Structure formats: C-alpha cells, structure tokens
Image: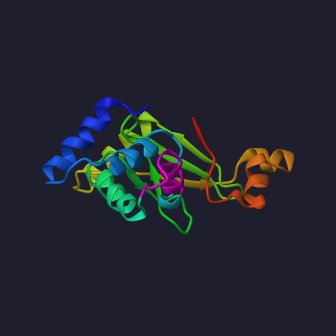
Amino acid sequence: MIDPELKERFDAYIRSKGLRRTSQRDVIVEAAFSTDEHFTAEQLWEMARRIDPTASRATLYRTIALLVESGLLREIDLGRDQKYYDPNFVDHPHHNHLICVDCGKVVEFEDEHIELLFDCITRRLGFRPTKKSMRVEACCDQLRREGMCPNLIEMRLGKRGKPRKTVA
C-alpha cells in the first residue's frame, strides 16, 4: 500500500502541471512505491502490468519523468548500462550506494560524516549543493573470503538486471 501523503504530493504536482490523475498513473505510482528495491523502467513496467495488464509503456515513461521531476523518485547510476530508479529518497534523502563490482550487490548507507564532508567541500569551493549522490564501487569481502557469493551466482545465472540491495 502506497503512503497516502506520497500519493497526495504526486497528485498535487501533476495538478500544478495541468495534468490529471488517471488510473494508469495510479497503477504505475503504486508499483514504483510498493518496493524499496531499485528498478529499471522495464522492471517497473513488469510490476505495473502485474497490477493492471493494460498499463501502457508510454504512460509509464511519462509517469517516471513526472515522479523524477517532482522529487519523489530518483534516477541513479549503479555503474551499469541502464538507468535505475530509487524509490527510497523520500524517506532517506541522504543515502548513498556501495556497489560490489564482482557480484552487483548494492548496499544503501547513510553517514553524518559524509554529509558534513559534502557540505564542507562544496562551501569551501563556493557552491551550495542542490542534490548530492555518492556511488562507491568496491569488491565485497564475502567473495574474497569464501570464494563464492550468492549475489555472484545469481548474476551469472542471468539475473544481473536486478541488483540485490541491502541497507547498512
């Protein structure tokens, strides 16, 4: 179930753009915020079609753009060849991503020291940040220690399109 406040924020945003609420938009918004996993547009379309098989791909792309413009959904770069979307920035606007280059596992993390560092660097260089993001690529210890990792096995079996996410 989608948070009613989030739904109202989106409804207010689309009204401000002179657009109307539609059942297909509602389905796409519900699908986007029914998970805390990162997803591609194609994965979101699959989730939306499970709710309503008539969901339109064109409406999906327009709705994703509106969700990103409204600040409810964030487009992120996970170091792959496609765009991913993160529905977790509304509740955790200052989180960052640690990505295993071997197995593709994604760990979300927040740290007050990083926020302070971002603030110090940008102010020292004469900037005021409008949006911050950090992506750290690294090798996970489990693969190095044990020689195998469940995420690597899944990735090699062809499930690479959907990175596994954990929260630190």
Residue 4 or residue 153, whichever sits in front? 4
Residue 59: quarter of image: bottom left
Is the image coloured rainbow, by chain, by secondary structure, or in one colour?
rainbow
The image shows residue 151 at horizontal and vertical percentages of 73, 49
Q: Residue at x 47, y 59 (%)?
A: 41
Dominant secondary structure (helix, strand or loop) of the stretch shown in magenta: helix
* Viewport quadrant of the N terminus: top left
Q: Residue at x 69, y 53 (%)?
A: 139
Residue 122 or residue 76, whichever sits in front? 76
Residue 82 or residue 108, whichever sits in front? 82
Q: Residue furthest right?
A: 147
The image shows residue 157 at horizontal and vertical percentages of 78, 59
State the count of labels.
Answer: 0
Q: Which residues are magenta?
A: 43-55
Residue 62: quarter of image: bottom left
The image shows residue 167 at horizontal and vertical percentages of 56, 36
* Viewport quadrant of the C terminus: top right
Q: Is residue 19 left or right of residue 48?
A: left
Q: Is residue 14 rendered magenta in the image?
A: no
Q: Residue at x 19, y 42 (%)?
A: 12
Q: Is residue 48 rendered magenta in the image?
A: yes
* Residue 87 visible in the picture: no
